[in-house]
Structure formats: structure tokens, C-alpha cells
Amino acid sequence: MPTEFRSGDALFVFDDSRTIVSWNRAAEELTGIPASEAVGKRCWEVVGGVDERGTLVCHPGCSGARLAGEGWPVRCQRLLVKTDSGTRRSVLVSTIAIRNGTEPLYIHLLRNGDEVAGDPPAARPAGREPRLTTRQLEVLSMIAEGMSARTIAGRLGIAEPTVRNHIRSILLELGCHSQLEALATARRWGLIV
């Protein structure tokens, strides 16, 4: 595996355990974080990405990486990422899954953005608060941990189609079109962490 991926834009590569295996020079310049402080650490600890409302996006269950690894297209999204100076930088993040033999690798390509002073305020969405059942909240939390419908079914001792029905109901209740969007919305409402 190459130790450096070259790109005019900042990028970093991590493995299935979310451990950074490559952090290019452009990522160093964008964040001020040297590769020596990023490689070998968990990506969410280094990047600490939040959306523009301050909702945590980077976490151990990275839905973007999980979905990309399963072959789903993941839309580019705007995140505020950490810098070495304690500020945040607004970036557009594209997620790409590749295979290195049998092991998946994930690339986050960061398109340069502006520096942002301080953390954005966490804001709850407008409208009525969603009402999810206890089981739906349980399924949503497992999705946030990066579990597939099959794994959730095994954990809960229910059929996989039942899990998929719960996911559909969650998407409808939250007014979302994807699991990734549902996780972000649920975090804004404080339904999951």
C-alpha cells in the first residue's frame, strides 16, 4: 500500500478500523496537523468533523464509510474539521471506498474551505419533534455504530426484513431520504449521540 496519496486537494486514507494510514501534504497544509500526528490514530479523533449546525458527524460508526464500503454512493458533504490552532475549517468531503487486496480502504478527499472561528451553535430543527419507538431508537443507534441491517437483525433476534421496515419507518418519521441523513437529523434532535 502506498504511504502517500498525491492530490492537489487534501486527503487522508483510513482502514476498516477507522485508523488513518495516510495523511497527505495537502491535508497537513489545510489543517496544520502533521502526518506524524494523524497516521495511526482514529480518523474521528483527528478530524472531529461536525456539520454546520454543530452536530457531530465524525464518530466510530462513520455511516459514510460504512455505506461506501457496501457499494452505496455517498454524496459530498460540507463539514467543519479541526485544525492544529483549535479553530475549524469548512471543507467539502467526498468519501471513496477502494479495495487493497481483500481489505477495504477509505479515502476522504477534503476540498479546501474557509477557517471558521469557534464551534457552530447546536440548533434543533424547526417543526415537531419526531416520535420514534423504543425499537426504532435501538435500530437507529446500531446504524450509528456502523452496523448493517443483517448484523442488527442478528443482535436483536429479529428478521432482516423487519429491520429494514424499522429503517423505512425511521426515514419517514424523520423526513429523510438516506440513513446518513437520518443519523444527522436524529443527532440534531438529540435522539442519538
Image: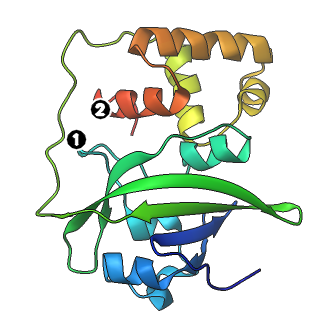
Q: Residue at x 50, y 14 (%)?
A: 170
Extreme residue toward the right, this view: 101
Above or below for 80 versus 1? above
| Mark 2 and mark 1 residues within 8 Å of each other at the beta carbon | yes
Above or below for 48 versus 51? below
Q: What's the CA distance linking mark 2 and mark 1?
A: 8 Å
Q: Residue at x 35, y 34 (%)?
A: 187
Towards the viewer: 119 or 131: 119
Q: Residue at x 71, y 29 (%)?
A: 152
Above or below for 141 versus 33? above
- Which quadrant of the figure has residue 19? bottom right
Indicate the quadrant containing the N terminus: top left, top right, bottom left or bottom right.
Answer: bottom right
The residue singled out by tag 1 in the image is 53
Disc 1 marks which amino acid? Arg
Disc 2 marks which amino acid? Arg
Residue 9 placed where, x, y %? 45, 71
Towards the viewer: 191 or 109: 109
The residue singled out by tag 2 in the image is 188
Q: Looking at the image, is mark 2 or mark 1 nearer the viewer?
A: 1
Q: Residues within 10 Å of mark 2 (few under 14, many from 20)?
A: many
Extreme residue toward the front, this view: 8
Viewer can see residue 122: yes
- Disc assigned to residue 70: none
